Amino acid sequence: MSEPENIIVAKGLRKLYGRHVAVDGIDLTIRRGEIFGMLGPNGAGKTTTILMLLGLTEASEGSVSVAGFDPMRQPLDVKRHVGYLPDSVGFYDNLSARVNLRYTGRLAGIPHSQLDDRIDDALLRVRLLEVAGRKVGTFSHGMRRRLGLAEVMMKRADVAILDEPTSGLDPQATFEFLEMIRGLRSDNIAVLLSSHMLDQVQAVCDRVALFKSGKIALEGTVDELSQKVLGGGYNLEIEATGDDLPKLLAQVPGVQRVTHSGGGKYSLVAAHDIRNELGKAIFASGGMLMRLDHVEPSLDTVYRHYFEDYHGAA
Amino acid sequence: MARRSGSIWTGCGTVFLKEFADHLRSGRMRVLEWLVLLTGIGAIYTAIQDLKTTTSQDPFLFLRLFTDSHDPLPSFMAVLGFLIPLVAIGLGFDAINGEFNRRTMSRILAQPIYRDALLLGKFFAGIATIAVALTTLWLLIIGFGLLTLGIPPTSEEVMRGFAFLVVAIAYGGFWLAVAILCSVIFRAAATSALVSLGLWLLMSILWPLLSRFLTSAIFPTTPMSLLVGPSYQEIIVQQTLARLSPNTLFAESMMGLLHPSTRALGPVFMDQLQGAVMGNPLPLAQSLILVWPQVTSLIAGVIVLFVAAYIVFQRQEVRA
Ligand SMILES: Nc1ncnc2c1ncn2[C@@H]1O[C@H](COP(=O)(O)OP(=O)(O)OP(=O)(O)O)[C@@H](O)[C@H]1O
Ligand SMILES: [Mg+2]
């Protein structure tokens, strides 16, 4: 079998729940060995899209190919090639971590002779090998997530689909988890993940898609997205005090957009470097300037600008 | 639905082994086993007290261990008819909704298996558990009988006992299918258990009364009927209604198998009795033919319930 470069191809994917349109015509292409991030507000249709890719929910319209198979017609072939970590992951509490993995491993059709080695290997990578014999009932939330990731690794699939893999993890655990996800890429596995944590997505994803009410509103690398949303402007972060600062800042020539990011902090998009002018304007109004930085565009800014515009327009 | 590739049996064995091991280990099963064992022994013990005083007249002494009752305790057969459904419901009421509530469903269904395999594996694991429990009980009774009665069962008694065991397992299968269907329909395990138990009470206690009541509503009492008794139609209607309950089917099969002198499971006409020696036992093959419709009805019921569970399950969203 020749290995297609595009491991997931979805065209015109739609899902209706009664009259409610959950996913409204999505085109998606994911290449072998890339990490693809899905972003978007709650209810935007990320999980529904994932379920359709897996064949766990029937698509109302459109076509999907995963590793060359159609999830509706050849669900077993698709599931053999995909590892899935659901957004709410549970295990059999009365069984040990190892026995839990052994069960899904057998269901996955992993040859008996390899199963225990693969389980050990996966548990080692998620640092759960020492507690492999403990009942999952005694595991913390983060340990369960890691066990879920171990299951995906054990399967040695071509695609790993992770639905909000880092939700509810502490910062250190999140960092480790992202490292593990990067580890998947080095195995030449395509990773599709959905998340609400933008800085993480930016840190780990090659490409991202912004979901909005069932559609993909934007797609590309973080740089491409910021080009599109922020117009390739000059990004500034400012921390200052003063009366009616947003209005004042907006009046400075060259300022395209002002967003309040809490406290005395604002982020600005400008046509060019206007740090001098800004400083002068703040001093002139009797305010105080604490900080004024030029920053690389972050996904966070892109996201907030995008959805602010969207809410503004709605 | 689109044609599917691959076998529905993929993964079925794995599910079966896991569920079977779970059942045998579970505290729930232990409680149910003790319940059956204690009530069973109570019933058997009193039967033995009676049998000891009337020993060696009956060629089917051993079978009477199962069927004799001694007030206030019911016979062992009646105890089983009442308790097997309880065990089956106990094993099946959270089969599917339990996976949803533990959030294991999406992980399991993301593996290369069909939903059929999960349902079938769980069903067969339940049946196997019931079979193990009933066989153990059966062997215990035979042993108990050997010790206290002091005579071995005849080969025909063993065969009849074995047929009884098979029917009892099928009866358990029916209630297991009811419980699994409820576990597919109701997301809360408590609701599923309540509905299954409600059906069980309806079938075992209320239905016999209801079927009589319904019949008398269809055939009102007239002076004529008071004189000559119920008409043939009336008896048939009453019997058909009663047989809608699996408990009736089970009780009738038990009658046919364990009381070898049972010649018919319905109204008997004089011409049918021609040439029959009253009270003489029927050969085993004849008894089997007699209860065949009852047993096949039970099995057909299991299949219908299972298909219903499959259809509902197939349409369910994976996320809870
Ligand atoms: N079983 C269902 N029946 C009806 N509507 C549903 C069902 N499941 C999901 N939806 C709807 O589909 C839409 C998309 O839901 P989905 O779970 O895909 O969102 P999401 O992007 O994953 O959100 P989140 O970030 O909260 O996880 C929502 O509006 C939701 O209400
Ligand atoms: Mg979601």
Image: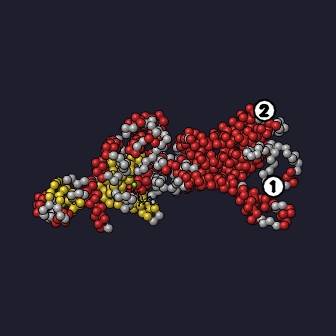
Taking the view exactly as shown, the residue that stands out farthest to the right is B275
Quadrant showing the C terminus of chain A: bottom left
The disc at residue B151 is 2
| Label 2 Cα crowd, 10 Å radius (few <14 / some 14-19 / many 20+) | few
Identify residue type, mark 1.
Pro
* Mark 2 C-beta closer than 8 Å to ligand 1: no
Camera sees residue A125: yes
Residue A14 percent coordinates (x, y): 42, 60
Identify residue type, mark 2.
Ile
| Label 1 Cα crowd, 10 Å radius (few <14 / some 14-19 / many 20+) | few
The residue at 58%/39% (across/down) is: B24
Left or right: B279 in relation to B82: right
Left or right: A78 in relation to B155: left
Residue marked by disc 1: B267
Secondary element at image label 1: loop
How many tags in the picture?
Answer: 2
Q: B280 or A244: which is nearer to us?
A: A244
